[in-house]
Image (tube, rainbow, N blue to C red):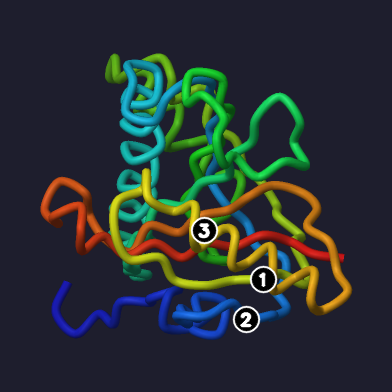
Amino acid sequence: MPGLTKFDLLKERKADYAAPKCPLLLEIPPARYLGISGHGEAGGREFQAQAGAIYNLAFALKAASKSGGRDYVVPKMEGQWWGENPEEVLMGQQRTIWNWKLLIRLPDFISEDEIARETSKLTDKGKAPEITQVKVEKLEEGRCVQMLHVGPYTAEAPALQAMRDFVVAQGLTLHGLHHEIYLSDPRRTPPSKLRTILRHPVR
């Protein structure tokens, strides 16, 4: 559709995606997401199936919105991670016991009816049954600590410890779920150059 401007949430909400090299406190406003949950190691069979389902729905919503005159960039994949104790950061825990929720942020103009309609269409086409597990999630994280990690996902521990030390020095504590925003595509980016925003709510 010539002349149609793409709405880009990452640019419109630039402050939410600050990527400092050192920990920073910031206020994250409420946001709507597509979300799908699972258990076990990242990259495993369940993870791949759930990731495929949420991407299928996200791009179906984009295509339908574009045909209606509202094009937008599908935001980056995000994820929340927790272990047996949701309040713990996952340093040192076996990856097989991890719980996760994959997230893709939604523009405000995408309605519940549109999501239900596209979900139904994909299901009727015989797409992966996991699509019916994708739900609309509203996160209200509020005050958070955030920083950029560059490198493999398995090498996040020093950044996470820096965030924890920073929070303690501010007289605060971590609470809620660890949150990551994946700025790089791991299929096209060497592990040493992966860029990931690490976020954790504080109080």
Secondary element at image label 3: loop
Instruction: Give, as a three-letter code, the residue at label 2.
Output: Leu
Q: Dot 1 lies on which element?
A: strand
183 up-or-down from 136: above or below: below
Going from N to C along the chain, the mark reached first, 2 or 1, is 2
Residue 99 appears at what percent x and percent y?
A: 58, 28
What crowding class fits label 3: few (fewer than 14 Cα within 10 Å), some (14-19), or many (20 or more)?
Answer: many
Total marks placed: 3
- The amino acid beneath tag 3 is Leu
Residue carrying label 2: 24
Q: Nearer the viewer, residue 33 or 174?
A: 174
Mark 2–mark 3 Cα distance, whole angstroms, equals: 25 Å
In terms of image quadrants, where is residue 66? bottom left
Q: Nearer the viewer, residue 138 or 88?
A: 88
- To which residue does mark 3 refer? 106
Asked whether the beta carbons under mark 2 and mark 1 sit within 8 Å of each other, the answer is: yes
Q: Secondary structure at mark 2?
A: strand
Q: Quadrant of the N terminus?
A: bottom left
The amino acid type of the residue labelled 1 equals: Val
Instruction: State the mark number for residue 145.
Output: 1
Of marks 3 and 1, the one in the foreground: 1
54 above or below 66?
Answer: above
- For the residues labelled 3 and 1, the Cα–Cα distance comes to 22 Å
